[in-house]
Image: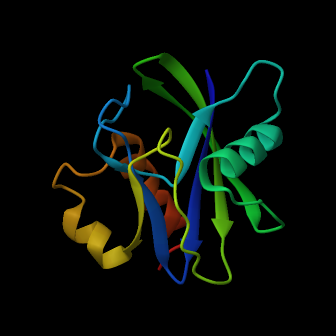
Amino acid sequence: HPVVRIIFVYNNRLLLRLRNSNDMFYPNLWDTTISSHVRYGETMEKCLERLVKKALNFHPSEHVEYKSYYTNMIQAGNAAIYYYVIQLKTELNMEIDPKYGQRLKWWTVKQIDDNICSGVFAELFMGEYPYLHIKKILS
């Protein structure tokens, strides 16, 4: 199952989404800005573009950076995860399509660090969070 995961970053803060209560994988947990399975025959780039436009009404631009690929076991099976970062030049107040999440919130590194063991974050996000520090996306 190829999956695209996208995190928005601005001024050392992350835009996270609160997943829906009926979410198949991580109900009512904070996670990367947006993620979705890649459709059959769709490239990663087309999936990213479709997903961000549909879920956030945002048009990706040159700020999109492919960061990594890893595999992980999720409830649907073994997932091939393609991780992207969108570095914003200004803070945007976006709204998420209710199909993709309950709401969005900008989180500081301190807020995330203070809550990392509290059970409010999705397992995949907690695995990806240290990578953002290692790659100097966050300080």
Tell me the quarter of the picture where residue 74 sits: top left
Given residues 19 and 123, the one toward you in this image is: 19
Would residue 136 be visible to someone looking at this image?
Answer: no
**On screen, residue 135 above or below 46:** below
Vertical order, 18 against 75 (above or below): below
Which one is nearer the viewer's eye here, 55 or 36?
55
Task: Tell me if residue 4 comes above or below residue 130 in the rendering.
Answer: above
Q: Position of residue 127 (x, y in %)?
A: 40, 47
* Point 75% across, 38% down: residue: 47
Residue 22 occupies quadrant: top left
Question: Is residue 116 something that shows in the picture?
Answer: yes
| Residue drawn at the location 44% of the way across and 59% of the way down | 16
Q: How many marks?
A: 0
Compared across the picture, whether 116 is left or right of 134 comes to left
Residue drawn 70% across and 60% down? 58
Name the image quarter holding the N terminus.
Answer: top right
x 47%, y 80%: residue: 139
Instruction: Please give left or right for residue 30 compared with residue 74 in the image.
Output: left
Q: Position of residue 20 (x, y in %)?
A: 36, 40
Residue 115, image x, y percentages: 21, 63
Relative to 54, is 92 above or below? below
Residue furthest to the left in view is: 118
Tell me how the rendering is colored: rainbow
Residue 63, image quadrant = bottom right
Q: In the rendering, at what x and y percent does residue 90 appear?
A: 64, 84
